[in-house]
Image (cartoon, rainbow, N blue to C red):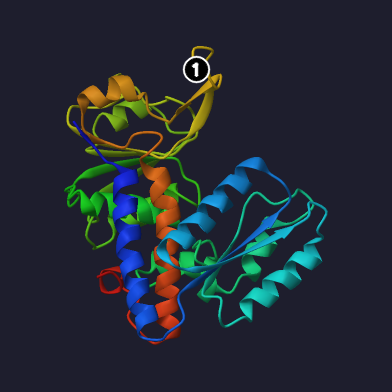
Amino acid sequence: MILLDGRKTSADIKEEIAESVIKIKQQGKRPPHLAAVLVGDNGASMTYVGAKVKACEFVGFESTLIKLPEQTTEQDLLKQIHDLNNRPEIDGYIVQLPLPKHIDEQKILMAVDPEKDVDGFHPTNVGKLTLDLPTFISATPYGIMELLERYEISTSGKNVVVIGRSHIVGRPMSILMSQKRKAGNATVTIAHSRTENLATITKQADIIVAALGIPEFLTAEMVKENVVIIDVGITRVPDDSKKKGYRIVGDVDFESVSIKASHITPVPGGVGPMTVTMLLVNTISSWQKQFGLSSNLNDLLP
C-alpha cells in the first residue's frame, strides 16, 4: 500500500511556485496577489484563512486579508466584492464560507469577477469546466487530480466511483475524471444518499473518491483488492483516549480499507494540504493571464 502524501506533494508544489515567484521578481514584475474576505469570527474559517495567508507568505505572494464583523450587511459585502473586482493588483480572491445567515451566499459568489474567482465557484467557471475550456478548477478537485497525476495513478478506462454530489467536490470530480486529460478518461459513477446497493457499486470500482461527510463510512467490505482510495472527508470524532478529546478521521475506515488498497490518502495529510496549494496555483495562473502569459500549470512551474 502506498500513501498518497498530500503534505509532501503540496510542499513540493509550493517550492516550485516559490522558485517561479523569485524569477518573477527578478524580472522586475510584481508578485501574484491573493486576497481573502472573512466575515465574522467562525473558528474553522479563521483557521483556513490563516493557512492561506501563511502559504502566500511562504511562496512570496502578496496577500490581503479583509476581516469584516459578523453584522456586516449583504450590501456592504457586495461593495467590498465590487472593490476587489476593480483592483488590478489583486489577481484573485476568495470569500470564505460559510457566511452569516443573513447574507445570501449565492448572491455573493455570483458577484465575484469570474476572472478573479480562484475558488472556481462562479457559474461561468463551472460552465467552462463542463465544456473542457480553460478555467479555474475548484481547489479540492484540482488537488486530487494533481495527486493522481504526480503519483502516476492509471485512470484511463478505469471504473471510478465518486461518493457525494456536491458542487465543490463530487460533481467537479466526475467531470474531470471523465475528460480527455491526464488522470482522466475514466468511466465515472456518482453515488449519493439515494443510491441503492452502494456496496455492490463500490466493489466494482478501481478508484473511489469518498466525499460524503460521514466519518469512516467506507469499510473494507465495500471495496475490492488494489483499489485506489481518495478520502476527502475530515471530521472530529470524540475520543477520550486522545489528549484533545477527539481524533480526526475521514469518510473512509482507514485501518481496514488500507489493507486492501494499492494507494490511499491519509486523513489528515492527504487531500487537505493540496486544497490550499492549488488555490495558489490558480492565483499564479490568474497572474499569468494578466500579463498575457500561459496559464498552463506545467508552464508556470520551473
Which residue is nearer to you in this view: 292 or 240?
240
Locate residue 72, reporting x and y percent.
Answer: 80, 58
Locate residue 290, reporting x and y percent.
Answer: 45, 84
Locate residue 169, reporting x and y percent.
Answer: 45, 49
Residue at the farthest top position? 241
Q: Mark 1 = which residue?
A: 242
Circle 1 Cα neighbour tier, 10 Å, few/some/many (<14 / 14–19 / ≥20): few
Q: Is residue 151 left or right of residue 143?
A: left
Q: Is residue 186 left or right of residue 137?
A: left
| Residue at x 47%, y 64% (from the top left corner) | 126
Work out whether 138 lies above or below 298.
above
Q: Is residue 186 visible?
A: no
Q: Is residue 162 left or right of residue 47?
A: left
Dot 1 amino acid type = Lys
Q: Quadrant of residue 225?
A: top left
Which residue is nearer to you in this view: 69 or 143?
69
Residue at the farthest front position? 26
Which residue is nearer to you in this view: 271 or 280?
280
Q: Quadrant of the C terminus?
A: bottom left
Q: Quadrant of residue 36?
A: bottom right
| Residue at x 62%, y 51% (from the top left corner) | 97
